[in-house]
Amino acid sequence: MRKALILGAMIVCLLLTSTGEGLHQQSMAVAKEPKASVAKLSIEQKTYPLSQLQADFRQFRKIIEKRHPKLYVNPQELSELFTTQYELLRDQMTELEFYRVLSPLVGSLGCGHTNLTVSKAYEDYLRKNGKYLPVLIRIINDRAYILQDLSGQGLPAGAEILMINGRRIPEIISLLWPNLTADGYNTSKKYYLMNNWFNGLYHYFIDNATQFTLLYRTEDDEIISKTLDGINNQEMQMTTMSIYYPRGNSLYTSAFTENYALLAIKSFSLRNKKKYRAFIDQFFQEVAEKEISHLILDLRDNWGGNPYYASYLLSYLISKPTTYFGKAPFYYIKYKNPLKPAKHRFTGRLYILINGASFSTTGHLCSLLKSHSIGVFIGEESGGSYICTDASINVTLRHTKLRLHCSTTAFATAVSNLPPGKGITPDYRITPTLQNYLEGTDPEMNLAIQLVSSPENH
């Protein structure tokens, strides 16, 4: 009996020991299992709850309604558009989806200085990871043509693109159009933006795909379909604000020939007033000393800047005291005083080259020249004219971090004979052709030189 009890106790101990070791081994095994990895979402994939999107929308609306001058939009129509766009919000939208809801509201303001930009985090992400359509294009008469193939697949320059990822070009243009900002009813600035930053605009407002199927027609009328991988390209990554930043080292240059002088000013967003004044003084002194009677002033691609630089140039082009601003904030009060002609003012024939990027302060300068019948204008309608809004504030939306650059004040030059909401109409309207783009010729400059040589101008 005692042996039986001892044997039973031994069996129980063995069972308990065995069970304990088993549990311990099992728990050790669990402890050694790698934890399930949770992939971190990129900023492109990150989504936001409806409550945060609604809060950012309300913040955005409040700024626009309280601070923006709204020169070209009917308040009731804007209110209705706010309601329409608000109803598009849904739970777990990405930043880009939310951006596409707000952007048409900015476009509806008819204000080229007000812009909405993606968050700094999204901009940084695109700088490293963005994939864009690997083809440079030009829009001519609402048709798209290949200017340069960057994919390495041999797409011919000059071929017409019919579709991108299943969408026809007219549809793409119509989808881009309400997202592009311009003053009033101007269209030349919008086409300029599409022609120079189509790839980035396509990503922001149409499709952030990484592969692109193009249907295109060759010059031999052959229709071909090709699928291209997107490329990372810093120039294509431009945001709706950074496109206005001046680029390049030579923002103002000059040249002299036997028959004419050329002055090209690519920006009035300059920092060295002393250097600029010296350059302008020296240029016009040389014009006077050489008795040059024809001056080509190239203001194309000049987005504007500080009125100081434009007014200083204007002083060399006027023949009598001229007031610069008719309406402006108090800190520009001095520009309401008549500007005196400079000592070596130009008295010959002036030819002014303009396009859709002749904007803001450049538009102001052009409006004064046009209003006082100084010079002839060559090119496309300018992107700006006598009135615009600026003195902008920068606001970051609380949750999505979208960045709003919002105008608050109207500026107008002292003119009374120009139509509102339109750029400066050129005396000689020139629209570059596909052949001009492919060959790199400059039809506006060529016409100016032709006019200089015309017997009528001598």
Image (cartoon, rainbow, N blue to C red):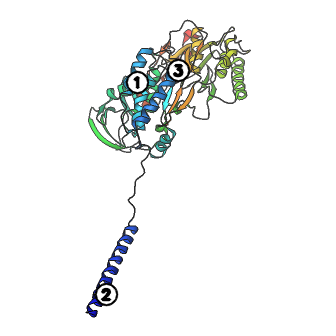
371 on left or right of 282: left
Question: Would you say 34 lies left or right of 63 here?
Answer: left
Nearest the eye: 394 or 303: 394
Q: Could you tell me the amino acid type at mark 1?
A: Pro
Residue at 61 percent across and 23 percent down: it is: 262
- Marks 2 and 1, how far apart in space? 86 Å
Circle 2/circle 1 CB separation < 8 Å:
no
Question: Would you call the spot at circle 3 few (<14 residues within 10 Å), some (14-19), or many (20 or more)?
Answer: few
Neighbourhood count class around disc 2 (C-alpha, 10 Å): few under 14, some 14–19, many 20 upward: few
**Image height of 10 relative to 210, above or below:** below
Q: Nearer the viewer, mark 2 or mark 1?
A: 2
Q: Is residue 147 visible?
A: no
Q: Which residue is mark 1?
A: 178
Query: What secondary structure is marked by label 2?
Result: helix
**Circle 1 — which element?**
helix
- Give the secondary structure at mark 3: helix
Q: Is residue 51 left or right of residue 287?
A: left
Question: What is the three-letter code of the residue carrying label 3?
Answer: Lys
Residue occupied by mark 2: 10
Residue closest to the far top: 417
